[in-house]
């Protein structure tokens, strides 16, 4: 069995993925500015290019981890359940905050692309960049965007939000847990929410709720916007 065929075995690609991520987490703990997702992806991409291995072969093992992503996403409901009662008094304000954040995120992303001279399909591809990937892809299609660009922007947004979001919020004086959670969940979806779990359960609770609400609001707003897209 040559190196490429050996590499494509599910057990090998799984081992490579887990090892790369473990190293990335170690690097992140030592140098906080290094995003684990980016640090884990780079060596995997390098190996695929070196062996001239198609992504489909590598994904034979990676698909098992992708399947676990659903479980990890559902697990975000645990802090929501634990702290649900504490959110009741803030629910109306949170709805308005997430709605405003969703509108601002869509307008600033699409408006920036338009001002830079991007063609309309690219502009529409940027609009749903702040919501989780499955919703973002469907919104992009509805707006006649390019889903591949949308996916890349969603990942980039999540990584930036998870890496710098909390620090930037604290820099401008935002320190309350619910405010941080609402901001990160609205703008950085699941990746940002996952980054809050190890810091504060309340932040993770609000962020998970905001992520879900932002997905609903973005879908509804995009449905209205789609009426004007030709």
Image (cartoon, rainbow, N blue to C red):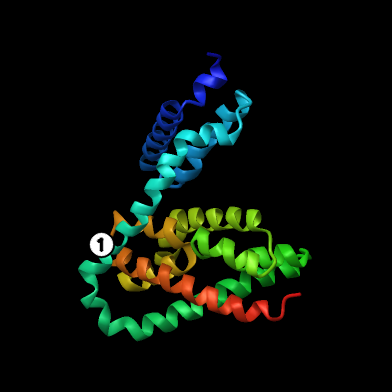
Residue 24's spot in the image, x, y percent? 42, 38
Looking at the image, which residue sits at the far top? 1
Picture residue at 74% right of the left edge, 69% below the top: 114
User: For the point 47% across and 72% down, which residue is it?
Assistant: 214
The residue singled out by tag 1 in the image is 78
| Percent coordinates x, y for residue 129 in the rendering | 57, 63
Q: Can you give x and y, in whole percent of width and height, for residue 36 in the image? A: 44, 43
Q: Quadrant of residue 204?
A: bottom left
Which residue is depicted at the point 58% across and 29% down?
48
Measuring 33% from the left and 59% from the top, which residue is drawn there?
Answer: 74
Between residue 114 and residue 134, name the one nearer to us: 134
Residue 226 in the image, given as x and y percentages of width and height: 66, 76
Task: Work out which quarter of the rendered image holds the C terminus and state it.
Answer: bottom right
Whether residue 174 can be seen here: no
Q: Secondary structure at mark 1?
A: helix
**Visible in this render: residue 185?**
yes
Q: Is residue 51 left or right of residue 21?
A: right
Above/below status of 53 relative to 228? above
In the rendered view, tell whether residue 34 sits above or below residue 177: above
Q: Say left or right for 160 vs 139.
A: left
Count of numbered marks:
1
Q: Residues within 10 Å of mark 1 (few under 14, many from 20)?
A: some
Question: Which residue is more in the foreground, 8 or 168?
Answer: 8
**Which sits in the foreground, 66 or 49?**
66
Q: Quadrant of residue 141?
A: bottom right
């Amino acid at each position: 069995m040559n190196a490429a065929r050996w590499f494509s075995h599910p057990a090998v690609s799984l081992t490579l993925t887990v090892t790369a991520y473990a190293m990335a987490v170690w690097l992140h703990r030592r140098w906080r500015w290094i995003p684990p997702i980016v640090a884990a992806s780079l060596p995997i991409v390098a190996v695929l290019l070196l062996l001239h291995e198609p992504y489909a072969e590598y994904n034979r093992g990676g698909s098992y981890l992708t399947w676990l992503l659903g479980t990890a996403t559902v697990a975000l409901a645990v802090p929501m359940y634990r702290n649900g009662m504490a959110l009741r008094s803030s629910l109306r304000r949170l709805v308005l905050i997430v709605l405003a954040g969703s509108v601002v995120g869509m307008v600033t992303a699409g408006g920036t692309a338009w001002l830079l001279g991007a063609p309309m399909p690219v502009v529409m591809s940027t609009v749903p960049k702040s919501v989780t990937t499955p919703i973002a892809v469907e919104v992009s299609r509805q707006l006649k965007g390019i889903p591949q660009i949308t996916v890349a922007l969603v990942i980039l947004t999540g990584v930036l939000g998870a890496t710098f979001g909390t620090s930037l919020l604290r820099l401008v004086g935002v320190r309350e847990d619910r405010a941080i959670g609402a901001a990160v969940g609205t703008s950085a979806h699941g990746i940002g929410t996952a980054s809050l779990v190890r810091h504060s359960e309340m932040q993770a609770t609000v962020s998970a709720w905001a992520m879900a609400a932002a997905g609903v609001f973005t879908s509804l707003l995009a449905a209205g916007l789609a009426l004007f897209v030709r």
